[in-house]
Amino acid sequence: MQQLAPQDPPSIGEYSLLGRLGEGGMGRVYLARSAGGRTVAVKLIKAELAGQPEFRHRFRQEVAAARRVGGEWTAPVLDADTEAAEPWVATGYVAGPSLLQVVRERPLPQESVRTLAYGLAGALQSVHGAGLVHRDLKPSNVLVTIAGPRVIDFGIARALENASEELTQTGVVVGSPGYMSPEQIQGERVGPGGDVFSLGSVLAYAATGRLPFGRSDTGIHSIMFRIVSAEPDLSGVDGELRQLIADCLAKDPAQRPTPEQIVERTRPADPAAPWLPAALIAELGQHAVSLLDADTPTRGAAPNPPAPDAGRAAYGTPPSPGTPSTPGTPGTPGAPQSGATPPWVQTPGAPAYGPAYGAPAPAAPGVAPGTPSAAAPYGSWVQGHLTGAEAPDTTGSSPQARKRSRRTVVIAGVAVAALLGSAFTAVALLRGDGDTVSSRPGGGGPATGAPDAAGRGKDRESLSSSEPGSGTSADAKDPASKDPAGEKPGEAGKPAGPAALPAAYAGTWTGSVYRDGADTGSQRRITLSPGKVGDTVVASLSVGESYLCKGTGKLLAAGGGSIRIDTGVTASTPAGKCSAIGEQTLTARTDGTLAWTASGGRTSTLRRAGSDPIPDGFLGSWERQLSGSSKGAQRLTVSQGAVGSSVVTFTTTTDGGTCTSDAALFSAGDRVVIGPSRVLSGDCAAAGSSVLTVSGSTLTRSFLDTGDSPREYRRP
């Protein structure tokens, strides 16, 4: 949590603001208290977005949908003003991480998954009882608390009475592919049974740590195909729970159990018994209690560094995946952005929750802040901090300062998950290049504030976040807990100077982008140059199935084991396709990689990239003969050039005339990756991003959109 900045209001509506939980493309989210003392999260929409009639209309719809849903298992909407110059909505503050974060560490034991099913089915009863279909139930939309799970995000909920009025544009689907129902994927009417299918996928993920219909790195389209035509992989799940999940995943909606039936099948024998492993309960309880120390902030104090992932401020810094360690599951988490180490960050090599999850805890332990549980499941504690994970240096600070540091609120704004994560989910098109376009007639460009629900190929300099993210929190009064606003501590009697980019970060880095544990099919390349906070030190390049985005950015903060950057778009192919990602966090790992996180639940493990030229074997001209109605030939010419520059030209000659286009270089090596083609002259269609490989006398052009067949060229 950050302190309020001078430009922040002291209150919104009747809610006194305590601090910032995060900031994303839609606006800012604050931790606040009502006049009666209730802790809430308030999302304040940006004025420029509120001035767009379509955005304001959809925001009204979302708030109205969320207000219709009540019950024990959902995060309540408490108040809102959708007509204000800067609209806002207040929800109950939910003190817990997302199910995605929990399962990234280790799958839950089956008894916990049974109780999870009970709570989520109860939430669906509330959603369906309000006349809605959720349509996007997935692990990141489930928050885990001591009292049970909570379902959030009604951004794409749809009224049951209008459920037949689905988007009519050919091939449009709404939701997150790994958790969609067959009827969603096929563009058919989605009713309550669609949510039950998604529930089955969520339960399978919670119990096994993997998607039930295959590895995420095989591609979104492959997963969708298996959802429609294959049986789920439920290995590792036994007994009644296995049968329940299999029933939920029936292809025919009529064969799936209702939420009411699921509630009866999973009703706990003792509803008051703890439902989570003891280690997890200890941490949840400890840090929920620490929230009580949050006090009304002192105005004008230097703000904390913004949360590393403003799009989804949650319980600690989000893990950043490398190559998934289990199918569909990201790897080890990176170090936190600030000095106050969240409990989710592990000492390298330490088990996530002790040797393994056991049975649910016999009782919820009362753990004082700064005290480990008996098993010390998150590493060894020293004065309230974890060793081996960037604990702050409190040397020289007063005992009072260290005490404040131990009281630090480290549960950073999980309610943001219900806020920044909830407004808009774009439509993923399963046609042609597979890129996301607006659901508006004509499909021209991304809908305002609408991220790709599928997550595939959407890491461009990019669409607004639809996924909640995580942040860390630190006590702004304790200078030992962090480097405030990226400033270095000054020498005695001298003012502090701006922090500089650590030498370990300088250079070029590249990696594949994941969202919600699934490979998006996008790749990101970041070059970091020496400089200080406020300097432009970033050059970025992102490539997806049908776009190439170039950008530059500034260093926002450096310290506490991480840096924060903010990038904007300088060039977009095709024009207008790219928009800014915003703030991103980079954390250096001990294995020489960087953990990259951004809004929308996007993560990547970046590795150093060389600046090798295009190999000689690619250079020169290649040709292929065209078949079908467009008889003629296409010449592909590869020339040497820098990353981001045009290195490939296409000249297509048919009976109808000649067309020329070009494509820019993303990376070189044995595989030359280029962005989508850009038509320079003539009447022809642009093609998507592709990979060039050479074998003997043949150059093969394979498209990132696996739906397009490879093309072979030979020397003329």
Image (cartoon, grey):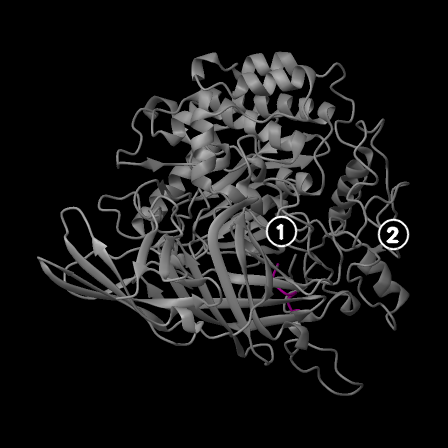
**Which residue is depicted at the point 67% across and 15% down?**
240
At 66% from the left edge and 45% from the top edge, which residue is drawn?
A: 325
Tag 2 residue: 380
Q: Is residue 427 left or right of residue 196?
A: left
Seen in the picture, residue 552 relative to 20 is either above or below; the reply is: below
Measured Cα–Cα span from mark 1 to mark 2:
23 Å
Checking the image for residue 86, the label placed there is: none
Q: Position of residue 208 (x, y in %)?
A: 66, 32
Question: Which amino acid type corresponds to the residue marked 2 in the rendered image?
Answer: Ser
Question: Residue farthest to the front?
Answer: 696
Is residue 565 visible from the viewing direction of this image?
yes
Q: Is residue 7 left or right of residue 694?
A: right
Give amino acid for label 1.
Pro
Q: Which residues are magenta?
A: 301-307
Specify the principal SS of the magenta part: loop
Residue at label 1?
321
Of residues 235 and 19, the one nearer the viewer is 235
Would you say residue 304 sits in the magenta stretch? yes
Residue depicted at x 57% and y 12%: 261
